[in-house]
Image (spheres, helix red, strand yellow):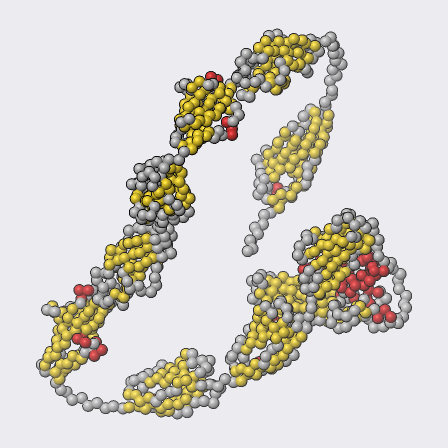
């Protein structure tokens, strides 16, 4: 996105030009901050790029000054005409920066000369530009002197406009110098109203132009001659589809287009099309004036504060003009002081840091209103937040005077006794934020005096006094007993607490004269090393015990003893080493749910010397390396319920212990565990069958199974009225049915089914009512499938498998019969269950055809069903195929049906023929139903044999019946007398049938030029470059393929360009063609992103 910036050093200014004179506009652009050359555009109005009009009338010039890095652009208009008047704009762009400026040209006539052309009198009344007022033709009424002019051909622009399409109006207006396009359209509309054009398709056409306010609706109406004709509406040449915005209406001869909620995109050319005829119009959308709905407020502030002026306008996206004391504030003049901000209908002018210069009256202007507000800026009073304190110091000490004021930008000066203090190596003055500091090192008696800080620009002074204290010491040698001075902040029992791994330095101040001897001990061990991890450092009055990287073994009591001739002193210290705790132990998962798990662990064996505050938990998926924190606040208990886990995914947990020192190492990972929930209860539990001692149940799987799956089902039963449930199966059953056995006869029983998986038992599915255990009688009934109620046809060798369901209780006796005789065929198998019987044949044979009967019987009740099976095979070949008659080009055949029809009807025959020469068979007829046929279109002089295949529902027979005799087509007595052969003279001189063509190729890429020649005897081919014969140069490859001549040039260079000639020569003459070959260089273009 381009950034607006002030690129113009000099901008073109609005001028009034004299007609017929020359005028030049100059714009200068500073390119010192640009990364590439700027691009300049000169525009007229909103759309016309003047670069397309460059010529004698309009000229452009560009220069560049390398010293100042300024580009100068000039636009010259030669002999200004009235059509040059209007608004102009120049735009400069460079990569991500752009800038633009506008200027106007007014054209005035030469004094005492008037233009007789009607177009130049075409203007608007008022002073508000092109869109103001009505058309004013008063200039046409002024008296003017007639003067002789050279007669020239008059052009009536209005006749041209009336005959043109609306889409060409702008082009014609520019060509004839009309700048007021809207006024031109209004006048054209009035002219056309007086001369309505009648057509065959339209009774009344569209008006030439329509005007509508933004947000309103408009209706375009035409009247057509045919009330039933369909019309099309187009916008800028694109067909309009009906929608909520565009509504089509058809009432009688009227056709209407209604445009709802018009916006600026609806400002376009519209067409109504009826067949081949069209009518045109233009719709102009007028924007209502933008008003100010919320006025500016006066602002009273202090220097340095931010100021916000805010107005609210009636429409989003409107332009607001800001001014201060009559001077416009825009992005070009704003700089870094002003900022403009838009938020919907709100427009804001922001002054980042107010100064006294910003005082004044500020205005906001829109097209329909204005608002003003006054800005008052006062100086900000300075407050003293911290004053300077008096100091009394000794020699060589440091004096620091510090004060704090309310404004961090205020500077100031330090004075001593009324003289400004100058900085030196010993005296330093600093200013950080709101704090001002004066530091004097190594205080001397001459530094005493009155010091003050005076802020710049403020009538304020902050003062303090420095007093110098001079101390005189008289040394009297004496002998003092040794004394150990311990820090009283160590607490009870002189205990020092140290974090493991840190460095410990026990500094003990020692006094005594003469200097005492020091001895450090830990328990009974003397510590005297001066180097190493545990060492003793001795200075004049300070003895230190140093422990580098404290360890747990360093914990214990330490004793320091000092002695000199005057006495002895002793002190005891206790060093306590504290550390992070050991990791928690025995992390394990005790229970799981659908998306949660309960984890427990044991406290760490060593708490680090301080109490454990709590624990932090982490979990991860098995196989992943990413741990997820479960809590950020310390958790005090050793039992935690982890939630929001994914069912069926393996997880691991680990725990950290936390004390006041830090966090322990992680515990060992828990054993992997998986959140799993039991399934929901089984569904659709029903009773399938009941006998004297059993009950068969059926059910469907649970609706919600989960990741744990189903391990099986447990079936339980009890007597009605009892709650003692008995498990019917020891192991879970996987099927969705089960028969409960050994039930008491006559009792009313309740049943329930439970689904089990690794998470446990699901809720039970229980029968709503009890079941009485007793045998239910049911008459035998065979339910024969629909496809077995007709004859079943199968091929030889295929499998036959028939499943026939039946019903009946108790279990009926099932018997199979074939053709009324009990079935006793070892190749036909049967299998019977409680609900169906199966008849199966592994490989069907013709002998298996017949009528099969299924008979079911319960005591004296029975039922039976018949199934007819037909096993079919390929038929045999026809017999006695004979050619019965031959005449002309025809032969008659007859044959008899095959002896073996394949156990089904013959549905047709296929006849083929073959002549004795080729012995290749060709099909003559297919699906011929009669045992005879006539073969036509035989070739004279050939002898034919015939063969016939029989066909049934299985297909064609494997073998064919071949005719016993043949059909000979006898030749008739025809004689052919050929004309004597006359040899043609093929000799001719060479002549090119396809010339060489001029070519332009890229250097480095293989190229070829081609032509074609004919001639006899075969001509000799000579290739030449610039009239020089090309010899055996390996760069050139010459080819001749059936008279097509090709010259291949391998990777041509720039020097290979020129004129190439191909010459063909034989004994009868010669011919030649030539072409020009241009070789272009390669240029590497940088990619621009």
In the rendered image of this protein, does residue 961 appear above or below residue 65? above
Residue visible at 61% across and 39% down?
1007
Between 321 and 933, the residue placed more toward the observer is 933
Q: Is residue 260 above or below residue 755?
A: below
Coordinates of residue 444 in the picture (x, y in percent): 31, 88
- Residue 542 at x, y = what percent? 19, 77
Of residues 194 and 88, the one nearer the viewer is 194
Whole-percent x, y for residue 930 in the image: 63, 15
Q: Residue 626 is drawn in which quadrant? A: bottom left
| Quarter of the C terminus within the rendering | bottom right
Would residue 467 appear left or right of 143 to someone viewing this image?
left
Q: Quadrant of the N terminus?
A: bottom right
Total labels: the figure holds 0
**Residue at coordinates 63% horizontally, 34% vertically from top-left?**
1046
Report if residue 622 is visible in the image.
no
Name the residue nearer the viewer: 771 or 707. 771
| Residue 1015 image point, x, y percent | 70, 27
Q: Quarter-wise, where is residue 688 in the image?
A: top left
With 388 as the anchor, is 984 left or right in this view? right
Q: Residue at x 67, y 57 (%)?
A: 245
Q: Residue at x 68, y 72 (%)?
A: 367
In this orientation, does residue 732 appear?
yes
Depicted 616 relative to depicted 819: above or below: below
């Amino acid at each position: 996105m381009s950034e607006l910036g002030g690129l113009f050093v000099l901008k073109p200014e609005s001028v009034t030009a004299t007609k017929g004179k020359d005028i030049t506009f100059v714009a200068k652009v500073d390119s010192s901050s640009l990364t590439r050359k700027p691009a300049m555009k000169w525009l007229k109005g909103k759309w016309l790029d003047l670069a397309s009009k460059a010529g004698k009338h309009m000229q452009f010039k560009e220069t560049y000054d390398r010293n100042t890095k300024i580009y100068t652009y000039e636009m010259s208009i030669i002999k200004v005409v009235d059509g040059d008047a209007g608004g102009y704009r120049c735009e400069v762009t460079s990569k991500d920066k752009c800038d633009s400026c506008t200027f106007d040209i007014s054209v005035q006539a030469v004094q005492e000369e008037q233009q007789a052309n009607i177009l130049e009198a075409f203007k608007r009344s008022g002073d508000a530009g092109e869109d103001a007022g009505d058309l004013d033709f008063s200039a046409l009424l002024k008296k003017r002197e007639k003067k002789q002019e050279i007669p020239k051909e008059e052009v009536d622009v209005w006749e041209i406009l009336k005959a043109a399409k609306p889409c060409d109006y702008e082009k014609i207006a520019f060509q004839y110098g009309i700048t007021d396009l809207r006024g031109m359209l209004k006048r054209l509309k009035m002219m056309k109203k007086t001369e309505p054009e009648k057509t065959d398709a339209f009774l009344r056409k569209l008006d030439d132009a329509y005007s509508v306010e933004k947000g309103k609706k408009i209706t375009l109406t035409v009247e057509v001659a045919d009330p039933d004709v369909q019309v099309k509406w187009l916008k800028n040449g694109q067909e309009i589809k009906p929608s909520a915005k565009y509504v089509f209406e058809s009432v009688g001869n009227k056709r209407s287009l209604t445009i709802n909620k018009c916006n600026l995109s609806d400002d376009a050319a519209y067409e109504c099309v009826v067949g081949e005829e069209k009518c045109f119009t233009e719709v102009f959308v007028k924007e209502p004036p933008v008003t100010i709905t919320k006025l500016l407020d006066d602002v009273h502030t202090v220097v340095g504060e931010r100021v916000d002026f805010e107005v609210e306008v009636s429409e989003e996206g409107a332009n607001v003009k800001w001014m201060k004391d009559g001077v416009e504030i825009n992005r070009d003049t704003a700089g870094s002081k002003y900022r403009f901000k838009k938020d919907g209908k709100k427009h804001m002018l922001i002054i980042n840091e107010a100064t006294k210069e910003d005082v004044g009256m500020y205005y906001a202007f829109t097209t329909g209103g204005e608002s003003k507000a006054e800005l008052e800026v006062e100086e900000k009073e300075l407050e003293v937040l911290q004053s300077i304190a008096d100091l009394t110091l000794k020699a060589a000490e440091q004096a620091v005077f510090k004060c704090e004021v309310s404004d961090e930008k205020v500077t100031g000066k330090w004075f001593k006794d009324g003289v400004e203090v100058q900085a030196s190596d010993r005296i330093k003055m600093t200013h950080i934020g709101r704090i001002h500091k004066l530091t004097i090192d190594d205080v001397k008696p001459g530094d005493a005096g009155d010091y003050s800080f005076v802020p710049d620009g403020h009538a304020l002074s902050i003062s303090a006094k420095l007093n110098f204290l001079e101390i005189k010491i008289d040394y009297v040698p004496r002998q003092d007993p040794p004394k150990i001075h311990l820090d009283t902040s160590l607490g009870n029992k002189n205990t020092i607490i140290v974090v493991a791994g840190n460095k410990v330095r026990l500094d003990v101040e020692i006094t005594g004269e003469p200097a005492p001897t020091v001895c450090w001990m830990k328990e009974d061990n003397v510590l005297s090393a001066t180097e190493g991890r545990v060492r003793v450092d001795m200075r004049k009055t300070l003895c230190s015990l140093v422990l580098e990287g404290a360890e747990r073994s360093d914990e214990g009591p330490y004793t320091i003893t000092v002695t000199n001739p005057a006495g002895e002193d002793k002190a005891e210290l206790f060093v306590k080493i504290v550390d992070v705790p050991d990791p928690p132990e025995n992390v394990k998962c005790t229970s799981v749910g659908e998306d949660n798990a309960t984890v427990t662990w044991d406290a760490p064996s060593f708490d680090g010397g301080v109490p454990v505050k709590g624990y932090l938990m982490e979990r991860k998926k098995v196989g992943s390396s990413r741990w997820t924190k479960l809590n950020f606040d310390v958790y005090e208990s050793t039992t935690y319920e982890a939630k929001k886990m994914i069912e069926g995914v393996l997880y691991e947990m680990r725990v950290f212990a936390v004390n006041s020192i830090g966090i322990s190492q992680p515990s060992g990972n828990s054993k992997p565990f998986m959140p799993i929930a039991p399934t929901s209860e089984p569904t659709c539990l029903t009773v399938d069958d009941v006998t004297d001692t059993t009950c068969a149940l059926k059910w469907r799987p649970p609706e919600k199974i989960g990741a744990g799956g189903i391990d099986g089902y447990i079936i339980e039963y009890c007597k009605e009225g009892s709650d003692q449930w008995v498990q019917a199966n020891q192991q879970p059953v996987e099927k969705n049915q089960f028969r409960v056995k050994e039930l008491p006869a006559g009792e009313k029983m309740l049943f329930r089914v439970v689904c089990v998986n690794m998470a446990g038992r699901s809720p039970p599915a229980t029968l709503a009512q009890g079941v009485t255990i007793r045998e239910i009688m049911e008459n035998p009934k065979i339910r024969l499938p629909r496809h077995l109620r007709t004859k079943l046809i199968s091929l030889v060798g295929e499998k036959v498998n028939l499943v026939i369901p039946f019903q009946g209780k108790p279990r009926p006796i099932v018997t199979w019969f074939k053709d009324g005789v009990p079935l006793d065929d070892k190749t036909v198998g049967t299998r019977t269950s409680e609900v169906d019987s199966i008849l199966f044949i592994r490989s069907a044979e013709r002998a298996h055809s017949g009528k099969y009967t299924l008979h079911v019987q319960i005591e004296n009740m029975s039922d039976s069903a018949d199934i007819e099976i037909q096993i079919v095979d390929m038929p045999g070949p026809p017999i006695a195929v004979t050619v019965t008659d031959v005449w002309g080009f025809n032969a008659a055949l007859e044959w008899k049906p095959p002896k073996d029809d394949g156990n089904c009807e013959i549905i047709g025959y296929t006849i083929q023929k073959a002549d004795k020469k080729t012995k290749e068979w060709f099909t003559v007829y297919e699906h011929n139903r009669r045992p005879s046929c006539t073969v036509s279109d035989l070739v004279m002089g050939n002898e034919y044999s015939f063969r016939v295949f029989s066909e049934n529902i299985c297909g064609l027979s494997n073998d064919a019946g071949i005719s016993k005799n043949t059909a000979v087509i006898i030749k008739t007595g025809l004689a052919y007398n050929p004309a004597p052969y006359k040899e043609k003279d093929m000799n001719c001189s060479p002549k090119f049938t396809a010339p060489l063509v001029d070519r332009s190729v890229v250097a480095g890429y293989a190229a070829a030029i081609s032509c074609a020649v004919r001639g006899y005897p075969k001509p000799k081919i000579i290739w030449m470059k610039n009239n020089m014969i090309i010899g055996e140069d390996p760069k050139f490859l010459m080819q001749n393929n059936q008279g097509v001549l090709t010259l291949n040039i391998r990777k041509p260079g720039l020097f290979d360009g020129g004129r190439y000639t191909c010459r063909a020569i034989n004994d009868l003459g010669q011919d030649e063609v030539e072409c020009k070959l241009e070789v272009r260089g390669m240029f590497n273009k940088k990619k621009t992103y």
